[in-house]
Image: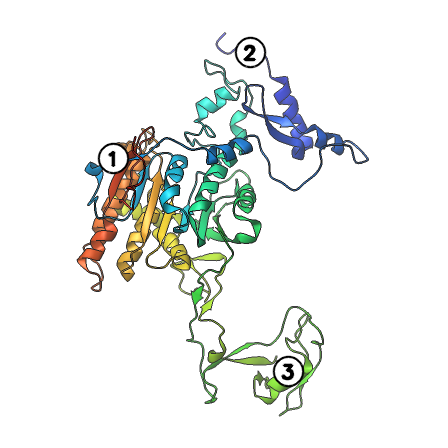
């Protein structure tokens, strides 16, 4: 009797699963009569799959839609009655510090920041929960813990029996995650300065959907790039024989400007022939695209040898311009007929002191980096940084300060505000403090973290940390103490003091903590 199922099979779910094997594009998500998400079939698409002609259906248009999108927009725009309350007993020099840490739901926190920080944040970095099927909990009801989700979606009954076979393989519905992110990104955009940027870490599970909602929120024309970040050096075990060794960082702005870039180095420029035009390098003299009269022979005036462009390549200049370069001694001809001509490019001709950055982020420990690479570090570096502060692995897979510092250097000046509303272990705060200590900057951070409970079996819980927010706060305190004793000689005690102190706040309704005061005197009280 213990092994008997106390319910009949759900044939609708089984039929949907069978159709998904044949027509995966026809499987979508919808709300049931109670408003809960469920897997369903797009019958218009299914009819088209089974028809030899175009069938009538809703008017086609380019859009990303999901159940709950309008509610997410409404939630983002709805006012709240929450307010911030100081928590001086947890703070460090509450009245003088200028960094902010908020403990609570980031949706509420982003709304509370609108009045004082509208258009004032230069950079936002977030590492949101990835949509992998693990728990993520937020108070706006777009995301639930696993048990509640399974019951509310009809996959478990009231006493915990599973009603759907293989439900764990489905992971999260996309709609929950998209709604959670959509409302927060709408609010975050308001906080950015006109020349500000947002960097979002993500993996393959929602990378394509995140790109689409960011196109909608920030504008497709304001997309900068996907940075590709290598997170591990060794291969991982997998059932499909693929090792997922990288993640992405999406970059958007309010308007399309440029990243700072990587400063040029001129160590390869020399002047062996004492050219009066100065140091030079031997550079490529060919182009990958045709553009006019660009395929013809050129002649070495000393040897009479003729040269055509390399195979499947073209000259970058028309014949008249090329002849002018030859007359000026700008074309370096090889000694033999089998070589290829090169261009003499002078150091003083550089259009900018900075090179455009590569979208491939390189490991900072590599001995020979490309001249336009920005450096990062793998997950092991982030873990070791936390380990060195806590003497324990209190946080899983934290990003490294090397990664965040590289992004900071592409955007912020020494007096800007940086926001991270999925603070996690507070790597962003640590990176900002470290960078300030290195160059005497006055950058300020705003961190937001939900007081999500730590697993009782985790190292963090065993070390006495009940919530992730407690880890965040303690890391900022410990990192600050570690940085303060050894500042560069150019730093004054006052400047170090103002950058590394902390003030704590709480709100009504959700438990909020604020790290540093930053002009919250006009926030309404309860």
Q: Which residue is pictured at 52% across the width and 40% down the height?
A: 206
Q: Is residue 308 visible?
A: yes
Q: Nearer the viewer, mark 2 or mark 3?
A: 3
Q: Position of residue 452 (x, y in %)?
A: 35, 32
Residue 478, labelled with which disc? none
Badge 3: residue crowd in 10 Å (few <14, some 14–19, many ≥20): some
Q: Which residue is mark 2?
A: 7
Q: Is residue 399 visible?
A: no
- Residue 411, quarter of picture: bottom left
Q: Which residue is mark 1?
A: 463
| Picture quarter with the C terminus | top left
Q: Helix or strand or loop: what does disc 2 sit on? A: loop
Q: Which residue is pictured at 44% across the width and 30% down the height?
A: 140
Q: Which residue is pictured at 33% across the width and 44% down the height?
A: 426
Residue 322, labelled with which disc? 3
| Mark toward the start of the polypeptide (2 vs 3) | 2
């Amino acid at each position: 009797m213990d092994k008997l199922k106390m319910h009949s099979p759900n044939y609708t779910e089984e039929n949907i699963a069978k159709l998904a094997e044949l027509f995966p594009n026809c499987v979508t998500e919808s709300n049931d009569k109670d408003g809960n998400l469920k897997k369903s079939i797009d019958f218009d698409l299914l009819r088209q799959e089974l028809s030899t002609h175009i069938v009538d259906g809703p008017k086609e248009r380019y859009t990303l839609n999901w159940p709950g999108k309008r509610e997410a927009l409404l939630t983002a725009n709805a006012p709240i009655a929450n307010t911030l309350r100081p928590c001086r007993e947890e703070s460090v020099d509450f009245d003088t510090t200028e960094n902010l840490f908020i403990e609570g739901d980031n949706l509420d926190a982003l709304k509370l920041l609108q009045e004082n920080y509208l258009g004032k944040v230069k950079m936002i970095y977030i590492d949101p929960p990835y949509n992998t099927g693990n728990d993520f909990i937020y108070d706006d009801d777009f995301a639930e813990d696993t048990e509640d989700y399974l019951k509310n979606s009809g996959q478990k009954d009231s006493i915990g029996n599973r009603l759907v076979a293989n439900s764990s393989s489905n992971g999260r519905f996309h709609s929950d995650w998209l709604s959670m992110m959509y409302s927060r990104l709408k609010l975050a955009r308001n906080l950015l300065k006109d020349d500000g940027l947002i960097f979002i870490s993500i993996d393959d599970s929602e990378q394509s959907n995140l790109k689409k909602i960011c196109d909608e929120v920030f504008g497709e024309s304001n997309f900068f790039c996907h940075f590709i970040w290598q997170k591990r050096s060794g291969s991982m075990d997998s059932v499909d024989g693929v090792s997922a060794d990288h993640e992405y960082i999406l970059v958007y702005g309010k308007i399309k400007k440029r990243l700072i870039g990587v400063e040029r180095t001129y160590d390869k420029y020399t002047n062996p022939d004492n050219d009066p035009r100065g140091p030079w390098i031997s550079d490529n003299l060919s182009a990958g695209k045709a553009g006019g009269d660009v395929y013809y022979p050129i002649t070495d005036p000393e040897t009479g040898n003729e040269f055509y462009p390399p195979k499947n390549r073209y000259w970058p200049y028309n014949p008249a311009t090329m002849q002018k370069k030859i007359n000026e001694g700008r074309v370096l001809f090889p000694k033999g007929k089998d070589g290829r001509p090169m261009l003499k490019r002078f150091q003083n001709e550089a259009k900018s002191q900075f090179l455009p950055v590569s979208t491939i982020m390189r490991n900072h420990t590599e001995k020979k980096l490309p001249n336009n690479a920005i450096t990062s570090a793998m997950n092991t570096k982030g873990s070791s940084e936390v380990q060195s502060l806590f003497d324990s692995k209190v946080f899983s897979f934290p990003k490294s300060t090397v990664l965040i510092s590289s992004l900071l250097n592409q955007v912020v000046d020494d007096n800007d505000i940086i926001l991270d509303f999925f603070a996690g272990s507070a790597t962003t705060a640590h990176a900002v403090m470290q960078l300030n200590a290195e160059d005497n900057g006055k950058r300020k951070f705003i961190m937001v973290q939900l007081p999500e409970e730590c697993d009782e079996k985790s190292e963090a819980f065993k070390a006495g940390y009940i919530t992730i927010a407690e880890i965040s706060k303690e890391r900022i305190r410990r990192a600050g103490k570690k940085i303060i004793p050894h500042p560069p000689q150019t730093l004054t005690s006052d400047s170090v003091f103002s950058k590394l102190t902390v003030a704590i706040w709480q709100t009504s309704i959700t438990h909020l903590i604020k790290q540093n005061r930053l002009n919250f005197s006009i926030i309404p009280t309860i």
